[in-house]
Amino acid sequence: MSALPPDLRPPAYGAAGLVDVLPGAAAALGVPVDRGDLPADPLGLHTALAGARRVAVLLVDGLGADLVRQHPTLAPTLAALASPVGDLSAPCPSTTPVSLATLGTGLPPGSHGILGFVTDVPGENRKLDHTQWRDDPDPDVWQSRATVFQHAEAAGVPATVVAPYAYADSGLTRSAYRGAAYSGTVSAGDLTARVLHALAATPRALVYGYHADLDLTGHVRGVDSDSWRAQLQLVDRMVEQVVTGLPDDAVLLVTADHGMLDVPAGARFDVDAVPELADGVRLLAGEPRARYVHARPGAAADVLDRWRVLLGDRAWVIGRDEAVASGVFGPVADDVAARIGDVVALARGTWALTASHQEPGPSRLAAYHGSLTPTELAIPLLVATGSSLS
């Protein structure tokens, strides 16, 4: 088996990962969550949040832990929050749909089955973009595991998701958040107000808020840009407003779905510009830093060899069985394994495996994520408490 390169890291499932945040928050509210073989609350949030009757989890898309540490003067509120367990780990691939489903279910990707930004729909020779998904495939079938919000609902703890109106009826929302009431937002200010309203509405509450603009700014302008830094300041102000408005018996947890890194022009490997890479390939999925390559029948071994040779040390290139055995997805259920490519290519360094003809828009972005470098994997878990819990 091809060993994980030294510059890539395995995700921490059931120890110190994004996967453990909502189960821990639920435990603090007395909600039991069935996680199979994973511990109920490895982060110790039941103890750390003792006395809390209301818990809000705010996920800021793209707010990597390394990026927070680099800008303490731009984000003084974030810099001043407690960090009781240190950095957490995003899942694999370190990309938004995978992370949101991992957060919402409290399970690794191999269990919940949302295994990439874009994946093959087995047996149908088509791709599913999880950010454009509505009802095909059926979200309740494609991701059939119970969410933490459903566990909260069953335990009598009201759960609310506060996120943009545009996502209210999406397949990803249904898969990751079912069991929660959906409160649609139109702006960052609206997000702040609705999170606080949901916290105050009932004596006990589990509230989840999602903010997307930092990630979008990073993708388009780069994380080393004035635009990204200005957006970070706005995020910090938003967090400050939530902290200031917390009910006395409430806790705010701030986390993220992944980090992000800029990709220079010289580190873009265009797979569409190398015709040999298309030989034997049925479908190219994933994204520029986490590729899934699905081979034509009988061609998987040749495709794997060809991608390994031509990509060299730009990526960790392995077959599906090797990827599953490595544990980077957690235990992989038999009924979702085929969603992983016959070949998996996780970018190393600052490389991106673009596809200029098949994916012209994504190939022009300034910054990416998806692989297993420390910068992409490390996400914060920051805590603020109401006055009666301080």
Image (cartoon, helix red, strand yellow):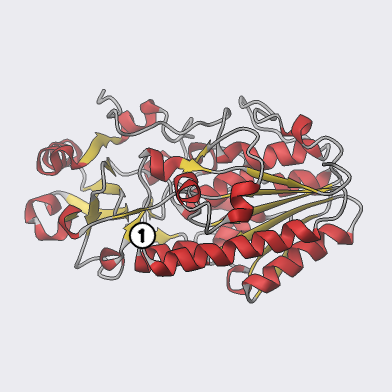
| Residue drawn at the location 83% of the way across and 36% of the way down | 30
Q: Which x, y percent locates residue 221?
A: 36, 68
Badge 1 marks a residue whose secondary structure is loop
Q: Quadrant of residue 182?
A: bottom right
Which residue is denoted by mark 1 in the rendering? 224
Between residues 144 and 182, which one lies in front from this camera angle? 182
* Classed neighbour count for the residue bearing mark 1: other residues with Cα under 10 Å, few (<14), some (14–19), many (≥20): some
Q: Amino acid at mark 1?
A: Asp
What residue is rendered at 18% in x and 60% in y?
Answer: 265
Left or right side of 371 for 389:
right
Locate the N terminus and report the quarter of the image it occupies.
top left
At horizontal 82% and vertical 58% (from top left) the residue drawn is 199
| Extreme residue toward the front, this view | 73
Seen as rendered, the residue at the extreme right is: 203
The residue at the point 68 percent across, 68 percent down is 191
**Vertically, is 317 above or below 240?**
above
Asked whether, in this view, residue 123 is left or right of residue 209, the answer is left
Q: Looking at the rendering, which quadrant does residue 241 occupy?
A: bottom right
Q: Nearer the viewer, residue 313 or 300?
A: 313
* Residue positioned most to the bottom: 186
Name the residue nearer the viewer: 390 or 296: 390
> Could you say where residue 285 lies in the image, as x and y percent from the top left?
31, 54
Asked whether the viewer can see residue 39, the reply is yes
Number of numbered callouts drawn: 1
Q: Position of residue 167 (x, y in %)?
A: 58, 68
Give the vertical position of 317 relative to 37 (above or below).
below
Q: Position of residue 328 (x, y in %)?
A: 41, 33
Q: Is residue 135 visible?
A: no
Quadrant in which the C terminus is drawn: top right
